[in-house]
Amino acid sequence: MNCAKKMGIVMLSEEEYDYLQTLGSFDLKTSSWLRTPNEVRELGGALFGDKRYNRTFTYHNGADSYYAARGFRGKTTVPYS
């Protein structure tokens, strides 16, 4: 999450990731860390998602887990006037 913050973006939540997967097929061979609710993070957990078999899956793992092929998906907002 610190990396995303430094980039000026917010990691996608589970709901946002599910919506993203309706727009296309992402993470067919990889997975992405997702913004995890505080109550899960406080217990040392983290969420990640991927798409397999034409379905979006969300899983859990320890927040300190390291996977070379797992990044994160984020969003930014553009001011509109």
Image: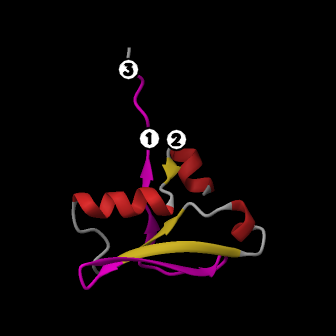
Position of the C terminus by quadrant: top left
The answer to which of 56 and 67 lies nearer the viewer is 56
Residues under numbered marks 3 and 1 in contact, where contact means CB atoms less than 8 Å apart? no
Q: In the orientation shown, which residue stands out farthest toward the bottom?
A: 53
**Span shown in magenta:** 51-80
Residue on which disc 3 sits:
80
Q: How far apart in space, not on screen, are marks 3 and 1 (Cα)?
A: 13 Å
Element type where label 2 sits in the image = loop
Residue 51, position as x, y percentages in the image: 32, 77
Give the side of residue 39 with respect to residue 55, left or right.
Answer: right
Nearer to us of marks 2 and 3 is 3
Residue on which disc 2 sits:
8
Q: Residue at x 25, y 85 (%)?
A: 53
Nearer to us of marks 2 and 1 is 1
Element type where label 1 sits in the image = loop
The answer to which of 40 and 5 lies nearer the viewer is 40
User: Counting residues from the N terminus, which is met first, the one under dot 2 or under dot 1?
Assistant: 2
Which labelled disc corresponds to residue 29?
none
Q: Residues within 10 Å of mark 2 (few under 14, many from 20)?
A: few
Q: In the orientation shown, which residue stands out farthest toward the top?
A: 81
Q: How far apart in space, not on screen, are marks 2 and 1 (Cα)?
A: 7 Å
Residue on which disc 1 sits:
76
Relative to 58, residue 42 above or below: above
Residues under numbered marks 2 and 1 in contact, where contact means CB atoms less than 8 Å apart? yes
Q: In the orientation shown, which residue stands out farthest toward the right?
A: 42
